[in-house]
Image (cartoon, coloured by chain):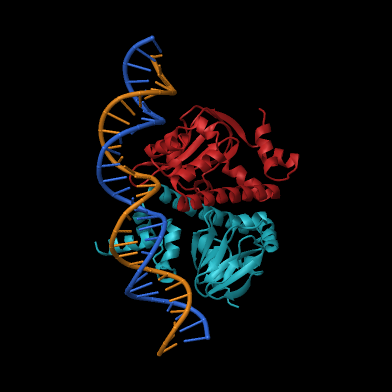
Chain colours: A cyan, B red, C blue, D orange
Amino acid sequence: MDKSILNHYFHSLFPIEKEVVEKITHSFNHFHLNKNAILLDENTVSTKTYFLEKGYMRSFIFNEEGEEVTTNIYSAPCFVNDFLSFFKQQPTRQIYQTLSPCSFWETSIDHVQANFHNIPEFREFSRLLFVINYHELNERLIEMASQKAETRYVNLLEKKPEIFQHVPLKIIASYLGITDSSLSRIRKEISTV
Amino acid sequence: MDKSILNHYFHSLFPIEKEVVEKITHSFNHFHLNKNAILLDENTVSTKTYFLEKGYMRSFIFNEEGEEVTTNIYSAPCFVNDFLSFFKQQPTRQIYQTLSPCSFWETSIDHVQANFHNIPEFREFSRLLFVINYHELNERLIEMASQKAETRYVNLLEKKPEIFQHVPLKIIASYLGITDSSLSRIRKEISTV
DNA sequence: AAGAGTTCTTGACAAATGGCAAGAAATCAA
DNA sequence: TTGATTTCTTGCCATTTGTCAAGAACTCTT
């Protein structure tokens, strides 16, 4: 099985030796999922770390009113991890669902723990991944708190144009914190300017 | 100097031996700041990790329109860390400001790095802190995307009532993603029900 | 205690977004 | 290919939140 995309991801994030990456990814297994499959369901404990090699997916949650709220949209290549559930080994409230046919690499919490404590470079990598994810979340929060929907839409269009080809608008709307009707109106508004 | 609050914080998060905690906090130094002081300014690189022992503070950012957006409100005891700036050693866009007289413990990135690579328990602790912070951010994002301002206000009132005694309403409003006028109206609305 | 500066409240109005329902368009499954 | 299902758009109207400005209340400094 060709691990080049997975291995390359490590090199793309920070300088790390080829041999170390191969040692880290040695325990990863490959698998596929169809469109609209559930990678990780709510109320279950995440026991794996996933690397999305190809495809699109999202995480979402049912809020108090029972409405779906899309919490994140993932486009390959990237790691997909429910940090809280995985590292605290507790049930997640989020659902991770594929939005297209997807291919993954996965490894278990035991391997992650072993690597974390035995391979200094992996520790640094893990932390960097955390920092990047935390920062992205923070940026989204700032946008939510201070920009109107139209601005958030335009920014997303600029930052992640590819998702508009692969993700239904109602999911993008929910990710932006608006209704699909509002998104539709915003798109109409912008296209006629 | 009495490190009991600092040391206790480690024990409160997860099981860890007294001796290990003391080894970790050995390098921490104590200091004070007045109200409205700047702990970490924008465009500077964070070289310290801070533990807020006593007091209240916030982080904020100037958005594209030059308006202040409060990104977080901190009430002791807790760690205060600009993850992106500290771990990637790059300038931050955020400003960390005290909202009351505060006392801190600080330690340098060099000590953090040494502990991270030499003390397994510290690695676990660091990661846990990340996980908790990430989760809190994610919960706030979900609220922002799916609840109206009044609900967000009521939730905050329930979750962190103490900040309403120590933090100006205009800062809380900004933290909730609304204007101070709106917050004022919401408060009036609720008090008369 | 006085004055300056800041924060909070309020009113009038405007802008942004939501709720609902219906139809159009696109997608999916057999 | 066809029918069923889902997604997207649109209109109408309601609700929420913002903007601006003025005054009241509060806080800080001297």
Picture coordinates of residue B98, whole percent (x, y): 49, 32
Residue B110: image quadrant is top right
Left or right? Give the position of D24 relative to B1: left
The number of numbered badges drawn on the structure is 0
Q: Is residue B72 above or below residue B134?
A: above
Q: Residue at x 53, y 50 (%)?
A: B139
Left or right? Give the position of B112 relative to A144: right
Q: Quadrant of the C terminus of chain A?
A: bottom left
Q: Residue at x 62, y 42 (%)?
A: B111
- Whether residue B49 is visible here, answered yes or no, is no
Q: Residue at x 54, y 67 (%)?
A: A97
Q: For this rendering, which residue is in front, D20 or B100?
A: D20
Q: Quadrant of the N terminus of chain A?
A: bottom right
Picture coordinates of residue A6, whole percent (x, y): 56, 69
Q: Is residue B161 above or below residue B139?
A: above
Q: Is residue D3 above or below residue A108?
A: below
Picture coordinates of residue A78, whole percent (x, y): 52, 65
- Whether residue B18 is visible here, answered yes or no, is yes
Left or right? Give the position of B90 relative to A80: left
Picture coordinates of residue A184, whole percent (x, y): 35, 63
Q: Residue at x 34, y 42 (%)?
A: B66
Q: Is residue B12 above or below residue A155?
A: above
